[in-house]
Amino acid sequence: MKKEAPNSKALNDVAYVCPQCGSANISTDRESSVLQTDAVEGIASCHNCGWTDKTTKLAAVTLGNPFGGKEQTLDAFASDVLTTTTKECILPIGQLLIRWGFIDGKKIDQRQFSRYIAAIAQATVQAIVETRRGIASHAKEKPNAAARK
Ligand SMILES: [Zn+2]
């Protein structure tokens, strides 16, 4: 079954978010980054509001070519964020999640914890990319600093 893939190259700089609440805290039933769900047919669900549907129903957010438009670069970045989050932040994030009751500190569910970590990394990637895009578009609107008074 070949799914219609409308110019998939153009989708490279698109991230997918929940169509209901706009959260990037999405997971799919595949081992795939939310950043590349255009290539994946599956079921996605939102951890923020509980929305669940096909990945094709996700809302696309254009990332605006922040890293030169290379999907691999974005993937590498996302992977680096996940590695860094896992390596450097797993303890404080774990303590935070336990403190606020998101996970049970007496009996830590590793799968749940991993989902939180992955979601945090994904959201971080999106936040950085969106911020970068905002900075870039702001610079475009005001190409010379003369606009500043
Ligand atoms: Zn949602």
Image (spheres, rainbow, N blue to C red):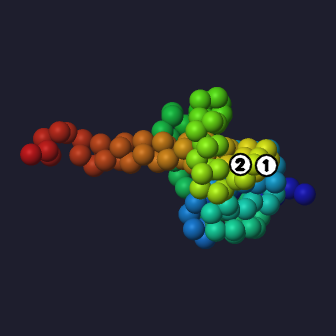
User: Which percent across, then down, holds residue 110?
Assistant: 79, 44
Residue linked to disc 2: 105
Residue linked to disc 1: 107
Residue at the image point whose x is 57% and y is 68% from the top: 21
Residue at the image point whose x is 42% and y is 42% from the top: 132
Q: Secondary structure at mark 2?
A: loop
Q: CA distance from mark 1 to mark 2?
A: 5 Å
User: Which percent across, then down, holds residue 38?
Assistant: 71, 52
Would you identify the image quadrant in which residue 125 lies? top right
Mark 1 and mark 2 residues within 8 Å of each other at the beta carbon:
no
Q: Is residue 22 visible?
A: yes
147 or 45, which lies in front? 45
Q: Is residue 116 above or below residue 86?
A: below
Residue at the image point whose x is 59% and y is 29% from the top: 88
Name which residue type carries label 1: Lys
User: Which percent across, then down, holds residue 22?
Assistant: 56, 63
